[in-house]
Amino acid sequence: MDRNGNTYTFIYAAILVIIVAAVLSAVAMSLKPFQKRNFEIEKKQNILASVNITSTSKNAEEIYAQKIVKSYVVDIHGNQIEGDAFNISLKKEHAKKAENRSLPVFECETSKGTKYILPLRGAGLWGPIWGYISLDSDMNTIYGATFDHQSETPGLGAEIATKMFQAPFKGKKIFDESGKLVSIVVAKTNETAPAEHRVDAISGGTITSKGLQKMLFDDLSTYKEFLIKKKS
């Protein structure tokens, strides 16, 4: 075969592409267990952060095993159903109608009693946002919250992932005095709401702030019957 011909060039390029693809595929497969483990550790860190427990990649698993005493899955009616709370994909669950979703719950034992952790997922300005919110045993008072995002703007919507934004959620109420689920208003400067149901929106990040407000209300609404049953 003429090494200077087009046929040789095409065959050589095709073989090279196949070899490179095979190598990349093998590397990806070998890294997959490490990626999965890193994802699980980060998830445990976020769950712990929602109850104001700081952890690192080195001690998160140990602290999680000590503090998260129970996890289970409920349906929209507040009934416990089969499922692995930790491994449920909120992205997949949100693709379903609310009445068909599996809703994870995590219970954390703290020096101030048992706290109930609920995962959340919604939409920001540029992509998905998510987080965890923990409640006191009255199933009304927020004990802690942590949020994150995929691609919000640094210095604006991305501020939802900062302690400065998350800290004011602590102590807020999600039910009003009549027992109605009102969740939390992430309020703009000129927007009024009762202090116990309000946190300040991010300056310049209104769309992300309101996306987070909607995420809270929509997801807490799916847990409403569970919360009512648990506190009664």
Image (cartoon, helix red, strand yellow):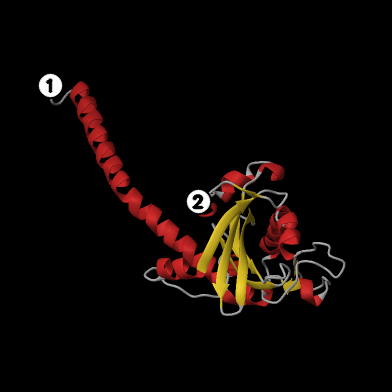
Q: Position of residue 177 (x, y in %)?
A: 85, 70
Residue ID for mark 1:
2
Q: Position of residue 221 (x, y in %)?
A: 74, 55
Residue at screen point 48% across, 63% down: 44
Residue ID for mark 2:
87
Q: Nearer the viewer, residue 232 or 210?
A: 232
Residue at screen point 13% across, 25% down: 3
User: Mark 1 belongs to which amino acid?
Assistant: Asp
Q: Is residue 103 left or right of residue 228?
A: left
Residue at screen point 73% across, 49% down: 77
Q: Position of residue 38 (x, y in %)?
A: 39, 59
Q: Residue furthest front?
A: 232
Q: Position of residue 156 (x, y in %)?
A: 61, 68
Which of the numbered marks, if any, corresponds to residue 95? Answer: none
Q: CA distance from mark 2 to mark 1?
A: 56 Å
Task: Relative to 58, say whether 227 is above or below.
Answer: above
Task: Relative to 37, say whether 189 is above or below.
Answer: below
Element type where label 1 sits in the image: loop
Q: Quadrant of the C terminus?
A: bottom right
Can residue 140 be seen? yes
Element type where label 2 sits in the image: helix
Quadrant in the picture for residue 227:
bottom right
